[in-house]
Amino acid sequence: ATTKWIEELLPLEMLTTKREDPAFFVDIREGLMASEVFQLIGLLAHLLYWFTLSVNRPSNLPRLAEHTLSTLLATVHELWSGLERDHRESPQGVSLVLPTLVLTLKRGIEKCFEQQYPMLMSKAELRQQVVDRINALVL
């Protein structure tokens, strides 16, 4: 779902007023298809679960250990830092590529939750609460 969105539905050309070479947009789409982006989406979705829904787990099920949480946070930071480092020095990177990456991450996390928790995401009020938490997580 995220791959199709990146390739076919993400309106990159409408997110900038500059008339860029079409190859520029191809490069951005290829960057958004990097395995690190998908890994980061999965880890952020996992992190969101533990921050928001794990409180509803039965008490007899294990909780996320502090060391595991620290490792998860460090891995997320490392992946984001690597992706951000490639674009933070150019005006196009800061004004277009990084915001598009953030949008892709948020959408990917939301799709993970739609797949994993369809009943939760089918209720408009609960879905909005998840989206609000996604926005807070990816600030």
Image: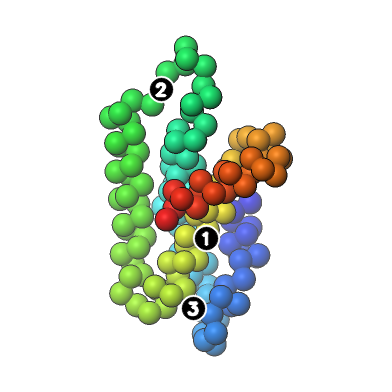
What residue sits 35% from the left and 52% below the top? Answer: 79
Q: Distance between the Cα atoms at labels 2 and 1?
A: 30 Å
Residue 84, given in percent of the width and then of the height, sits at 35, 63
Residue 47, given in percent of the width and then of the height, sits at 43, 39
The residue lying toward the viewer, choosing from 9 and 121, is 121
Task: Name the quadrant of the C terminus.
Answer: bottom left
Mark closer to the chain start, 1 or 3:
3
Residue at the disc numbered 3: 24
Residue at the disc numbered 1: 103
**Can residue 38 be seen here?**
no
Q: Considering the numbered disc 3 on the image, is that residue within a helix, a strand or a loop?
A: helix
Amino acid type indicated by mark 2: Arg
Mark 2, other Cα within 10 Å: few <14 / some 14–19 / many ≥20: few
100 relative to 42, above or below: below
What residue sits 43% from the left and 66% below the top? Answer: 98
What residue sits 45% from the left and 44% below the top? Answer: 44
Residue at the disc numbered 2: 63
What residue sits 47% from the left and 73% below the top? Answer: 96
Q: Considering the numbered disc 2 on the image, is that residue within a helix, a strand or a loop?
A: loop
Q: Please tell me whether mark 1 or mark 3 is closer to you in this view.
A: 1
Amino acid type indicated by mark 1: Leu
Q: Considering the numbered disc 1 on the image, is that residue within a helix, a strand or a loop?
A: helix
Extreme-bottom residue of the structure: 19
Residue 60, given in percent of the width and then of the height, sits at 47, 12
The residue lying toward the viewer, choosing from 119 and 72, is 119
Mark closer to the chain start, 2 or 3:
3
